[in-house]
Image (tube, rainbow, N blue to C red):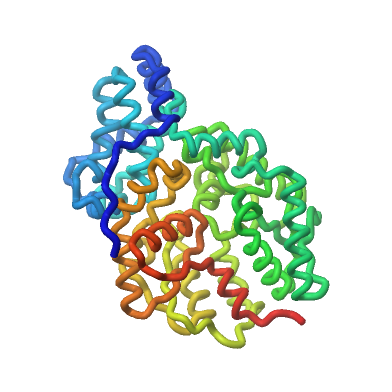
Amino acid sequence: MGEPLLKTETRDIGLDTGMAKLTPEKIEKVINEVLENETGAKLKVYVDTCVHCGLCSEGCHYYMSNDKNPIYSPAGKVKQTIWEILDKKGKVSPEFIRRAAEIAYTECNLCKRCAMYCPFGIDVAYLMLVVRRICHKLGVIPQYIQDTAHSHAATMNQMWVKEEEWIDTLFWQEEEAAEEIENLRIPLDKEGAEIMYSVIGPEPKFRAQLIYEVAVIMNAAGLDWTMPSMPGWDNSDMAMYTGDNELMGRLKKEHFEAAERLKVKKIVMGECGHAFRSVYDMGNRQLGWKMPPVRMVHALEFYYELFKAGKIKIPEKYSKGVTLHDPCNVIRGRGLHEMSRYTVNKICSNFIEMTPNREHNYCCCAGGGVINCGPPFRNKRVVSDRVKAEQLMAAKEKGAEVVIAPCHNCHGGLEDIIDHYKLDMELKFLCDIIYEVMEKPE
């Protein structure tokens, strides 16, 4: 494995310029407004219940990967941020806010693994989200992720994709796929279709082949489906992670309304974890819905249903040794781990579990918006997931050549880990392999 990168002071224009504009009066006012108007019993119970036992520590990949340095333990991060804020009743310095922002945005993936190791189930991800909310309202946010949120606000997608570019990409993928399968269509704005398929902003920009592959799967399964041409096609939501709850709600409203305009029965989402969290857990609640107003199915559940119903045939399974990464948001957050294994076993002949797995799996260290904080924090992110590299290496030693990661952010994080630690493993989405081995129409 490669040597750990050296830690350097992390400079970020968003954090630095945001801090420079702060005054003690503004900090105290904003903190107390958030605490009084946006928190309640949940925050009080978590803070009052914690007995500082430290059992959460070994649930955190940052702590485990940084030689068990207590500043990276979940309780340590809480102690350095929200506890200090509460103890001083908001009377903290601009420098304190900058450090709190760096911890909340770049040293916690909001993966909730630590909550399983806490005897009281304290949700540190929620506490870090409160810190992010305060930092958002103070304007102290890493530049790269804030730029992404700006794209959401201006275009309703995270990659500044213009409406004509989005439609051109779908036509392009339809044309390409039709060369392989005659009469294949990617239906746009088909009212009353069974399924609306939605993706995240980076797909038309960087991973258009995933749209191609899913179009072939939909076609082979004989499904009645459509994709929206209008805003609402992008189901991602970095505002959820910057702490801009108002924008998060606006994005989810657009997504749900696209489905309702098309009168579809359900939304099938691509292989993205955070996007699912934004519609199934946080964004829907911001809008006042306990559950999404339209049935929402993640790709893992969708593939499972297709194979259970016998709608996809596999003439010959994928023969390379594969291992499976469990994305936090759809495994700990939704419990799809057995469904994903059912599909992997349907399409692969040599499945090797990495350990630990399922809800105990280590995070990729990219989620929670951490990878979206950009190059300034890349080194810290890669070093802080050494345990993931060790986990992958152990699977490789048992014969795994390919890592299946059914989540876009996980792909980004694992790609960096595989590269840095010189693991020499392939990385694939689940639909990459389904497309490769499935029986296709003539």
Residue placed most toward the observer, 420 or 429? 420
Front residue of 329 and 62: 62
Q: Position of residue 8 (x, y in %)?
A: 29, 40
- The location of residue 141, given as percent across then percent down, is 44, 31
Task: Decide which of 110, 163 is in the foreground and name it.
Answer: 163
- Which residue sits at x=65%, y=40%? 156
Q: Quadrant of the C terminus?
A: bottom right
Instruction: Name the outermost residue toward the bottom.
Output: 315
Left or right? Give the position of 242 relative to 179: left
Whether 237 is drawn above or below 141: the answer is below
Work out whether 349 lies above or below 225. Answer: below
Task: Answer whether residue 261 is visible to the viewer in this image.
Answer: yes
Give the residue at x 56% y 31%.
Answer: 246
Q: Is 52 rendered above or below residue 176?
A: above
Which quadrant would residue 351 be assigned to in this image?
A: bottom left
Q: Residue furthest top?
A: 25
Instruction: Please give left or right for residue 83 compared with residue 320 in the image.
Output: left
Q: Is residue 352 above or below residue 418?
A: below
Q: Position of residue 113 (x, y in %)?
A: 33, 53
In the visual, does 93 lie left or right of 326?
left
Residue under the point 39% across and 56% down: 364
Q: Is residue 133 in sight in this rendering?
A: no
Q: Position of residue 295 (x, y in %)?
A: 63, 55
Q: Quadrant of the N terminus?
A: bottom left
Q: Quadrant of residue 252?
A: top right
> For the view shown, which residue lies furthest in the right direction?
183
